[in-house]
Structure formats: structure tokens, C-alpha cells
Image: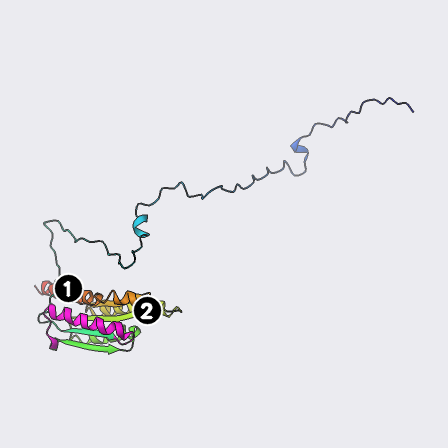
């Protein structure tokens, strides 16, 4: 055997064409998905209102709503109510549930009614078992047509079950429906809070509900007078 071998040369392959493959040229390979190195929306502009939406109250303080009044240009007709109660009959429907809160809300509402000029004998108070019963009572009172407005007072405190969400939603929609169906203003003086402490800090919402009801009653009275004229 000779100890000299010719150098190895690979065999020459015929020229390759994509057309030689059965079925035509192969589909191009899909590029590999690129995993972003950082949050994909990090470069997006941030909303200017974000800081306001994300604000949280400092301990012991409550975030207030934006202050200010509506500014109507001159030259327009305006019908605006005032929270006055002279010669008006008002019904107050109040929930007995969470009575430690609703009792104080009722007292605050009575104070607001007296300050607005509503006589005690022109006020009818209707206690009901809970916030869920407020709409039905408000609807029945409104249908009598004996009252210029209805004030609904209640307190719903979140618990460990979804019960809170169902009662709060039904109370709100039901009270609105009572006003829409009868044309008698029904104000929403129902607290929907996380705990009793939050409710205690919002007892004055009862006075706000009284003022809202009286103001809307005055608006409706003006509208009726305009229609008659």
C-alpha cells in the first residue's frame, strides 16, 4: 500500500434552484419573536390627568371635588333653582340599617330642612329596613304627589361579600328611576363607604342631599310656571 494518497476533494454538486423543489419555492422562515427588553409602553406620553386620578388622601384628610361654579355667558335664558323650602312639603325616607350612621344623617337632614325654611309639619319621615328598600318607598311617596321632593338617606358599608355592590347599585338606580318615572325630584343621600369611619366623616352628605332635592324642586316649579305662561 502506498503511503501517499491524493488530497481529498468533495464531489461537485449540480447547481441548485428553488424551482427544483416540489411545490415551488419554500416559504420564507418567520422571524423569531423579539422579547422587549423593557416595558413596551414606557416611551408613550403620560396623560396629564394621571397625577390627579392617582392622588390618595393623606391620613386624616379627605380629597375634595373640584371647586368652582358654572359661568353662563350673558344673553342666555337661565332656569336655576335655589335650595329654599318655604311652602314646600318634603318626604325623607331613611334606612334603619347601620342606624348609628343613618340616625345622625337624619338629624343633619332635619337641621338642613329647618335652615332652608321647611316647617316641621311639612316634613314626613319614613323609616325603612335598609338601603335596598329606599327606592320602593321613594317611588310610593312620589306617586302621592303630596311632596315637592324626596330625600333618601342610607349607609352601605362594604363587607366581605359582594352584597355591598348589589345593594349599592340597586339603591342608586332605583332612586333615579323613582324620580324619572314620577317627575318628582329624588335626591341620593346614600353613603357607600369602605368602613364606618368613612361614613362618620360624611354625615354632612345628608345636608347636601336636602339642598339638592330643594334646588331641583325649585327648578321644577319654575318649569311648570314657564309652561303655564
Residue lying at the far front in this picture: please name it: 59
x and y percentages locating residue 50 in the rendered image: 32, 48
Colour scheme = rainbow
Task: Specify the quadrant of the image occupied by residue 63.
Answer: bottom left
Closest to the camera, between mark 1 and mark 2, is 2
Examine the residues drawn in magenta and state their main secondary structure.
helix
Looking at the rendering, the stretch of residues picked out in magenta corresponds to: 95-120
Marks 1 and 2, Cα distance to the nearest angstrom?
Answer: 28 Å
Query: Compared with residue 218, is residue 143 higher up or lower down, i.e. above or below?
Result: below
- Nearest to N terminus: mark 1 or mark 2: 2
Q: Is residue 114 magenta?
A: yes
Circle 2 is placed at which residue position?
157
- Which is nearer the eye, 17 or 117? 117
Determine the residue positioned at 17% across, 77% down.
124
Which label was assigned to residue 85? none
The reply to whether the magenta stretch includes residue 225 is: no
Along the line of sight, which residue is nearer the eye, 70 or 156? 156
Q: Is residue 142 visible?
A: no
Residue behind mark 1 = 215
Q: Position of residue 77 (x, y in %)?
A: 11, 54
* Snapshot quadrant of residue 105: bottom left
Residue 48, image quadrant: top left
Number of numbered discs on residues: 2
Residue 168 visible: yes
Amino acid at each position: 500500500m502506498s503511503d501517499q494518497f491524493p488530497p481529498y476533494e468533495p464531489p461537485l454538486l449540480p447547481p441548485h434552484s428553488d424551482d427544483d423543489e416540489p411545490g415551488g419555492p419554500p416559504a420564507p422562515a418567520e422571524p423569531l419573536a423579539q422579547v422587549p427588553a423593557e416595558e413596551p409602553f414606557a416611551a408613550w406620553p403620560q396623560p396629564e390627568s394621571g397625577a390627579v386620578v392617582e392622588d390618595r388622601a393623606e391620613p386624616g384628610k379627605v380629597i375634595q371635588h373640584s371647586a368652582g361654579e358654572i359661568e353662563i355667558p350673558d344673553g342666555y335664558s337661565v332656569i336655576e333653582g335655589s335650595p329654599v323650602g318655604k311652602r314646600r312639603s318634603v318626604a325623607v325616607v331613611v334606612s334603619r340599617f347601620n342606624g348609628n350612621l343613618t340616625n345622625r344623617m337624619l338629624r343633619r337632614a332635619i337641621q338642613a330642612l329647618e335652615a332652608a325654611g321647611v316647617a316641621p309639619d311639612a316634613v314626613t319621615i319614613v323609616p325603612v329596613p335598609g338601603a335596598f328598600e329606599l327606592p320602593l318607598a321613594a317611588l310610593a311617596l312620589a306617586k302621592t304627589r303630596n311632596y315637592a321632593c324626596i330625600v333618601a338617606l342610607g349607609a352601605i358599608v362594604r363587607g366581605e361579600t359582594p352584597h355591598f355592590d348589589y345593594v349599592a347599585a340597586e339603591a342608586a338606580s332605583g332612586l333615579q328611576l323613582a324620580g324619572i318615572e314620577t317627575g318628582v325630584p329624588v335626591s341620593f343621600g346614600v353613603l357607600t363607604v369602605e368602613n364606618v369611619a368613612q361614613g362618620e366623616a360624611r354625615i354632612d352628605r345628608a345636608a347636601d342631599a336636602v339642598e339638592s332635592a330643594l334646588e331641583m324642586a325649585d327648578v321644577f316649579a319654575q318649569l311648570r310656571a314657564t309652561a303655564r305662561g
